Amino acid sequence: MNLFNVYPLFDIDIAKGIGCRIYDNHGIEYLDLYGGHAVISVGHSHPYYVQKLTQQLEKLVFYSNSVVNPLQKELAEKLGKISGYEDYSLFLVNSGAEANENALKLASFHTGRRKVIAFNKSFHGRTSAAVRVTDNPKIVAPINEGFDVEFPALNDMEAVRNSLRNHDVCAVIIEGIQGVGGIRVPDATFLQALSEECKATGTMLILDEVQSGYGRSGKFFAHQHADIRPDLITIAKGMGNGFPIGGVLISPAFEASFGLLGTTFGGSHLACTAAIAVLDIMKVEHLLENALKTGNYLMEELNKLPQIKEVRGLGLMIGIEFDQPVKEIRSRLLFEKKIFTGASSTNIIRLLPPLCLSKSDADAFLAGFKQVIETGE
Ligand code: PLP
């Protein structure tokens, strides 16, 4: 059987990872500035994480949500504390798309409405609110059966007000920082006005923190830089440091009832163990502070380079925009300098490293990056 060929792949077989380094099957070392698409939060194969997962693996991987699982409670308590959302409830799932689907469902059940506002260039996974962020002409988008979705421009409050005017929208869904769309940070004043307008019109505000959350921006959630409290917050990626787990943080205004939501695998014993280990490490190693400090340093240094059109982001979620396509730069970084990066559209390099990235790792990246862009054609 062949694999269904939907991903353009580098011909590199990653066999091992330690901290911010990964190694291929020939033992060649790479610096990881991409973290498997923002998934690696506490670093590859962190010894505490490995120990906790191994111990749990020997006991129990999974039993269904028909019995009490104390690990879910421990996770919810620790997550509430570190994020500042102790009064919210947690529903556990397996991925970012699933988290967003459940948040949209909750918003729809709660309001009795089925219209959704997402934003131009947003990405919420392969969900009902999916928007076209690819140039592939075969992809017909938005893929929004089930919901009517409108896509105003980010930061366009006038357009949002217009859409919410009839009080028929169940949810506005917005990323804490747009990731796939090119690392675009919503204005704090826009988020504040959006939050107010949602309250005034009975619209649920869903903050998709799947990519921007879990400490990446230097605060636990990127929207906390704007000091707002959404109705629903979705999480995944960095939550399990590579183990699939996602969740929805749900405000106390929502009432739970048996059968309202459900999942087979969500919140398994092993997944919860991974997520608890991540939070323990983040706390002990002060990874939020590190993300802010190292991210600020990287952005400061990148801003000195005249070849770059614009540097955007917060903490360790950084977009480096060029006037020209970045394919060649990324490929030279990878094959000549052994540095993994990501991309958004054709002309933006995306950095999403593990949150334990040190200053010397950042310097190693900057040295390789400068050499590549200074010798580019
Ligand atoms: N939301 C955002 C902001 C994302 O960046 C992604 C994935 O890139 C998703 C949702 C979907 O997450 P998953 O691929 O785990 O379904």
Image (tube, rainbow, N blue to C red):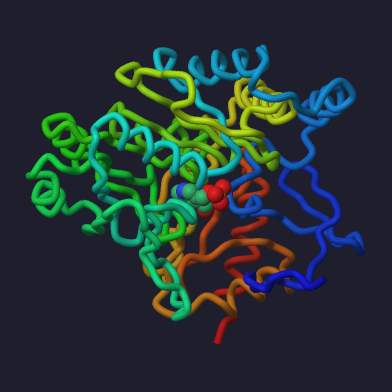
In depth, the one of 179 and 203 nearer the eye is 203
Q: Is residue 13 left or right of residue 280?
A: right
- How many numbered badges does the structure rendering display? 0
Q: Position of residue 203 (x, y in %)?
A: 21, 35
In depth, the one of 223 and 267 nearer the eye is 267
Q: Is residue 25 left or right of residue 232?
A: right
Q: Is residue 201 visible?
A: yes
In depth, the one of 195 and 96 nearer the eye is 96
Q: Is residue 29 above or below residue 297?
A: below
Q: Is residue 288 left or right of residue 23?
A: left
**What is the quadrant of residue 329 in the picture?**
bottom right
Q: Is residue 268 above or below residue 297?
A: above
Q: Is residue 69 above or below residue 302?
A: above
Q: Residue at x 45, y 71 (%)?
A: 134
Give the residue at the far bottom of this rendering: 377
Q: Position of residue 372 (x, y in %)?
A: 61, 74
The C terminus lies in quadrant: bottom right
Give the residue at the far front of this rendering: 259
Q: Is residue 347 left or right of residue 265?
A: left
The N terminus lies in quadrant: bottom right
**What is the quadrant of residue 201 in the picture?**
top left
Q: Position of residue 200 (x, y in %)?
A: 11, 31
Q: Residue at x 31, y 28 (%)?
A: 231
Q: Is residue 348 above or below residue 101?
A: below
Q: Residue at x 57, y 16 (%)?
A: 78
Q: Position of residue 53 (x, y in %)?
A: 80, 28
Q: Is residue 300 visible?
A: no
Q: Residue at x 62, y 26 (%)?
A: 282
